[in-house]
Image (cartoon, helix red, strand yellow):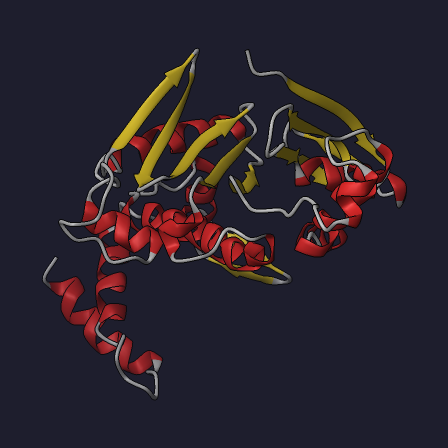
Amino acid sequence: MVNNYYVYAVDRDFGPFFLKFCSYFPFNAKLYLNEHECAKRQLTRKGISFAALDNGVLSCADPARLQQICDGLSAEKIDALLRKWLRLLPHPFTGADRKAGYRYDISILQAEFSLTQVLDRPAHGRLFFEQVIRENLDLGRPEEVQLIFNRTVSRRTPGQFRTRIVTQDVTPSLNVYYKHTRIKQYHKENRALRTETTINNTYDFGIGRKLHNLPKLREVGFAANRRLLEIERLSHDCMLAEDTFQAINGPVEVGRQRVSGLRFADLRVHALWQAMILFRQPAQGFRAADLRRHLAALSASM
C-alpha cells in the first residue's frame, strides 16, 4: 500500500489549497490551487465588495480591479507559495537533503482556464445555451477542432475528435476534445455561461511543462475559449427579444424629436429596407432624393 499525505491549508493571499506528498522515493508532491479563491481572498483583503458564484464571481464593485488581480497570477507567485509552505510544513526532504541540492521543482500537470459570462436574464440564457448545443453538435469534428485550438489536425493527429453532451441532473454540458485537452461549456448555477479549457498535457501545443510556461498556456486556453464562443455566435440564429422588437416596431422619442416606428408587417417598410440595401456600397452615402426615387418605384410594384 502506498501512503500519500494530504495537507489542507489556507494561505493569506491564495486562500484554500492543498499539498499531496508521496511517502516513497522520489517523494513526488502535488500542489492544487484555485485562482478564483485567490481572487476572492484579494478582494476581501482590499475591502472590495463582491458576490461569489461557487467557483467564480457573480458580481464585483470594481470589475477592473478584479480582472487585474486575475491577470496578476504568475509563475513566480505560485513558486513563492510553494517555497513558503515547504518552510512551514514537514516534508520528505530533510535539511541535509536541501543543503545537498535536493529540492522540489514545479511542473504543470493540469491547467484550467475559464471564462464566466454572467447573464442578466438567466432564463433566456438557458434557452440560448440549449439551442447552441443543438446547433453545434459537429464542433468535435477535426475541421472545427483545428479552428478552436488553432492547430493543424491530420489523420496522424492522435486522439478521438468528438462532441459529447453530458446531462447531469438537469444541467447539460457541451464537451469538445483535442488530444488530451477538453473544452467544457455549461450553464453555471442557472446564472452564467461557463466556458473552460482544461489542458492535461502541455505537449499537445508544443509547450513544455515547467511552470515558467504558464503565460503561454494562458494564451492557448483563453484563445480557445474565445474561438469557441465566436463559432457559436456565428452559427446561432439569434432571435430578438420581445422588448427589443417592440422598441424598433413602435415610435421613439429622442429629446423633442419623435421618430416613427418601423412596422415590419407594413409593405412600405419592406420597400424602405429594400431601397436602403441598394446604397450599401457607395462610399459617399446617399441623399433623401436618391432614396425617394427608388422607394417610389418599389412602392408602385407592391
Query: Which residue: 36% across, 39% down?
Result: 180
Question: Which quadrant of the structure image shows residue 200?
Answer: top left
Residue 161 in view, yes or no: yes
Residue 277 or residue 159, whichever sits in front: 159
Q: Determine whether 48 is above or below 72 in the image.
A: above
Q: In x, y percent, where is residue 62?
A: 78, 49
Q: In x, y percent, where is residue 232?
A: 34, 45
Q: Determine whether 101 is above or below 22 in the image.
A: below
Q: Determine whether 1 is above or below 240 in the image.
A: above
Residue 202 or residue 186, whichever sits in front: 202
Query: Which residue: 55% across, 36% down?
Result: 119
Residue 42 appears left or right of 185: right
Viewport quadrant of the C terminus: bottom left
Q: In x, y percent, where is residue 207?
A: 44, 57
Residue 181 appears left or right of 41: left
Viewport quadrant of the N terminus: top right
Q: In x, y percent, where is residue 174?
A: 36, 31
Query: Which residue: 30% across, 48% down?
Result: 264
Question: Which quadrant of the structure image shows residue 260?
Answer: bottom left
Seen as rendered, the residue at the extreme left is 301
